[in-house]
């Protein structure tokens, strides 16, 4: 029945899958990574490449006091305490060491400044030098090549194969699969002598499945994910007896552009410049309505609650933090205006209220405290009065699935009927539920994927091999 | 292998299970109802016996304009649009007819006045004459006896048995089972010639399972449900391939007493008198903090958000609506005070702010509009100034699981992998997810159970019998 066998079979080639592969291989196991799409890296490649770490060298350089405890507290606050705290704590505890691992082991290049993302108490976010998750995925692929880890593309997980004890024995796949045609490709069975690791990401693009969990996410609600972010492997895991966790908790990103598809280049513009160094404006009123640095859930709820159309505005000083400005301008995702008058007219915003809003906001900044919405005002945040001005039109898009299957701190998948591990079955990354509770903070996904990917890989490699 | 067979095998003897049994039997099928506990009726018996209906005789008498559309809109508003709208619509559409069915077919006795419960746009709630769900369950049990429907107690569903097509062929049970000992009783297999109907209720008492979905619901968070409200049948259904829906949406009741266990007698006191005709007070400040007639989720969130200890106060006029007053006083769940001074002292509430709060509140009532918190002010709501005063100390308790398994409008359980019905498998009542979205309105559970119980029973009876 088996066409091939490896010690560790990994499904998915994003951050979690590749981290697992590297650790399992390093521990001496034979490893294969299966990827259904035609390119490796999944959603990780197109992510913004933001990495939170509590207690990093850049924080030390800038005298920023941080700790895993503080990072965990931020995660729990955003997650509304729905987090599986033991899992969240591990991400926070290992975040700094994991960041160093990407630098020292993988050679990832980061920008020399930290970002302070919404919902984080302090600046703790590293940015990859190329402002993209590809800045981490590429070095990981290089490392896999050096370690002789095969990454088999266009290979679709069509079935999980259980052993006599209900544990994971291997997988049936379709090779030369053409996404999303489930009848394409040819069937092969791959045995896992030690374990299977599921690292297939979220289901943000699975419009049918996500609507069952959150009917507000109708067909027309856009998504920042790559097309392959679908639910079929999650469903297979549940049928194997895995425990569903918080599947209805699906995050929308508040920062995406109305003028491009997907994550695009606008999201990073808003995240790094528009929100921290600019203001978020309700186009109907010309007013601010929320702390621009709140976590994503609070922002999206505020943006959706009254059906407001929103733009973010930033001036010439604030825009220096935008790493994707050039592409944004080229693609018409961000527009530049010499005056607020022109900006208001082009966006059909009411001019006088908008000007009043900016005046009020500038006064708050000079005072050093936003008593209206509680936006944190770091010392490099300047009053907004330096033309030209830049505006991005926003729309909320499905971005991240907080829900998924339940694992323990060893990354073992837990059975729904008794809470015990399913034999030889690990999971890591967005397929796992509970780490982030009701809302994931920006730049916490990559730490989660890398931390639990590495844990899964190490532990899978320690399973006693089947004869 | 089979010890017995019936056309329709129903698991659970609450509202949904008995409604299904009556309809299936009426359609000519042989039926058995299996109940794991030693008494029939499950959680339904101890519920408050509140039944919402849009377009009822009492509404007509009182000239209250209502419609299924309005009831649906209320359900969606409370549910934050997480509702599976097709299911919610059916509950609203059939609510009035179902109420009449309980009166005409079952002989249920109701009080002659409607109640206006929180989150409902209008008064649409019937109260059973004995202020308890037993007022409906007992006539249902009588009807079952008349129709020769056996209700087998202490019979635990230990396994679902699939047919060759993955449909439901029957169940393995343990007879003479002693809850919660899963090894107790003797094993028997019962075949369903037509279908199995799962009507086993929610999992509010399953402290392990509920904490996986909502980690805030720790061991010490109390629950209004009967002890048998556990998750094992939900888990079995998921293992059969059913689709989990919104399992993390678990409702706490804001109206339960700190001075008794479970639902008790205090809950109805708050629901019928304390909240609609009294005020809800933060004991630390002596102030109101929320519209007392908001839906349960908003109330609980407001009560929990700042860790406030709350009491509800009602005066001699308002207390006339409390149907459980005598028992409440006898059990010390509600205490009576001649003056606000005494009430404040006994509850350690700050007196002057409390008096100011009551004055402000009374002024709002006389004005006819609560511009502070938006509480609806019907014409029979009087200023609170008639001693004696009554106070109940509140604590939020787990009350209802909005999440569960997915069904279609025919009450067929839908597969997770393709959305199609699992053969010969129906479900109704609290085990079903999606009807109420993020928050169930008070008095909407009984309509849901009866409407979908009846649908399940009718449709199960129409399945072609196995040979």
Image: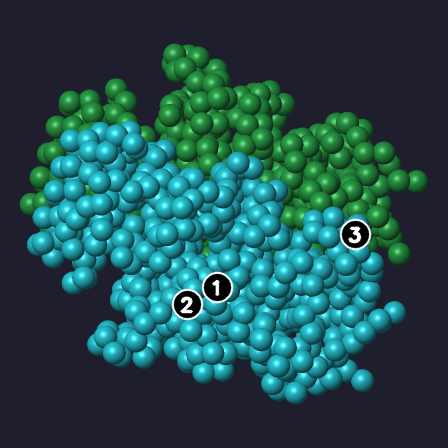
Chain colours: A cyan, B green
Could you tell me residue B198's position as x and y percent?
A: 68, 45
Residue under mark 3: which chain is it in? A
Q: Is residue A397 above or below residue A465?
A: above
> Callout 3: few (<14), some (14-19), or many (20+) C-alpha neighbours within 10 Å?
some
Label 3 vs 2, first from the N-terminus: 2
Asked whether the beta carbons under mark 1 and mark 2 sit within 8 Å of each other, the answer is yes
Residue visible at 53% across and 52% down in the picture: A225
Q: Is residue A267 left or right of residue A354?
A: right
Q: Which sits in the foreground, A248 or B150?
A: A248
Say which mark, if any, is on residue A184. 3
Residue under mark 2: which chain is it in? A
Q: Is residue B333 above or below residue B81?
A: below
Give SS at disc 1.
loop
Q: Is residue B384 above or below residue A60?
A: above
Give SS at disc 2.
loop
Residue visible at 82% across and 60% down in the picture: A187
Label 1 vs 3, first from the N-terminus: 1
Q: Is residue B355 visible?
A: yes
Q: Examine the image and state in which quarter residue A464 appears.
A: bottom right
Q: How many marks?
A: 3
Give SS at disc 3.
loop
> Callout 1: few (<14), some (14-19), or many (20+) C-alpha neighbours within 10 Å?
many
Q: Residue at label 2?
A: A128
Q: Is residue A22 left or right of residue A424?
A: left
Distance, label 3 to label 2, CA atoms, is 37 Å
């Amino acid at each position: 029945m088996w066409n091939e066998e490896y010690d560790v079979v990994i499904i998915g080639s994003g951050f979690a899958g590749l981290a697992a592969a590297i650790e399992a291989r390093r521990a001496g196991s034979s490893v294969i990574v299966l990827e259904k799409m035609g390119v490796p890296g999944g959603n990780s490649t197109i992510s913004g490449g933001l990495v939170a770490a509590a207690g990093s060298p850049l924080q030390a350089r800038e005298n920023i006091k941080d700790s895993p405890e503080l990072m965990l507290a931020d995660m729990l606050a955003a997650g509304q305490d729905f987090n599986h705290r033991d899992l969240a704590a591990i991400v926070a505890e290992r975040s700094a060491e994991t960041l160093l691992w990407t630098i020292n082991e993988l050679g990832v290049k980061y920008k020399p400044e930290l970002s302070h993302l919404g919902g984080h108490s302090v600046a703790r976010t590293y940015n990859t030098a190329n402002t993209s998750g590809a800045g981490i995925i590429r070095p990981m692929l290089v490392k896999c090549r050096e370690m002789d880890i095969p990454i088999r593309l266009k290979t679709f997980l069509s079935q999980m194969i259980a052993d006599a004890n209900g544990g994971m024995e291997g997988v049936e796949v379709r090779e030369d699969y053409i996404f999303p045609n489930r009848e394409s490709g040819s069937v092969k069975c791959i045995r896992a002598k030690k374990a299977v690791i599921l690292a297939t990401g979220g289901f943000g693009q699975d419009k049918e499945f996500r609507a069952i969990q959150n009917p507000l996410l109708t067909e027309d609600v856009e998504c920042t994910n790559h097309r392959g972010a679908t639910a079929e492997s999650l469903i297979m895991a549940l049928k194997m007896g895995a425990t569903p966790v918080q599947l209805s908790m699906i995050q929308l990103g508040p920062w995406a552009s109305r003028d491009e598809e997907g994550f695009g280049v606008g999201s990073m513009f808003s995240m790094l410049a528009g929100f921290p160094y600019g203001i978020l404006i309700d186009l109907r009123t010309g007013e601010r309505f929320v702390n621009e640095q709140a976590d994503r859930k609070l922002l999206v709820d505020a943006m959706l609650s009254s059906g407001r159309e929103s733009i973010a505005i930033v001036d010439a000083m604030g825009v220096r933090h935008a790493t994707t400005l050039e592409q944004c301008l080229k693609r018409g995702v961000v527009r530049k205006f010499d005056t607020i008058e022109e900006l208001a007219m082009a966006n059909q915003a009411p001019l006088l209220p908008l000007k009043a809003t900016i005046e009020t906001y500038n006064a708050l900044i000079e005072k050093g405290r936003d008593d209206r919405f509680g936006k944190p005002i770091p010392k490099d945040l300047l009053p907004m009065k330096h033309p030209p001005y830049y505006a991005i039109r926003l729309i909320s898009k499905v971005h991240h699935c907080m829900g998924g299957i339940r694992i323990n701190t060893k990354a073992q998948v837990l059975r729904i009927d008794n809470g015990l591990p399913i034999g030889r079955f690990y999971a890591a990354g967005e397929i796992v539920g509970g780490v982030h509770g009701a809302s994931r903070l920006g730049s916490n996904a990559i730490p989660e994927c890398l931390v639990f990917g590495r844990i899964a890989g190490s532990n899978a490699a320690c399973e006693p091999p089947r004869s």
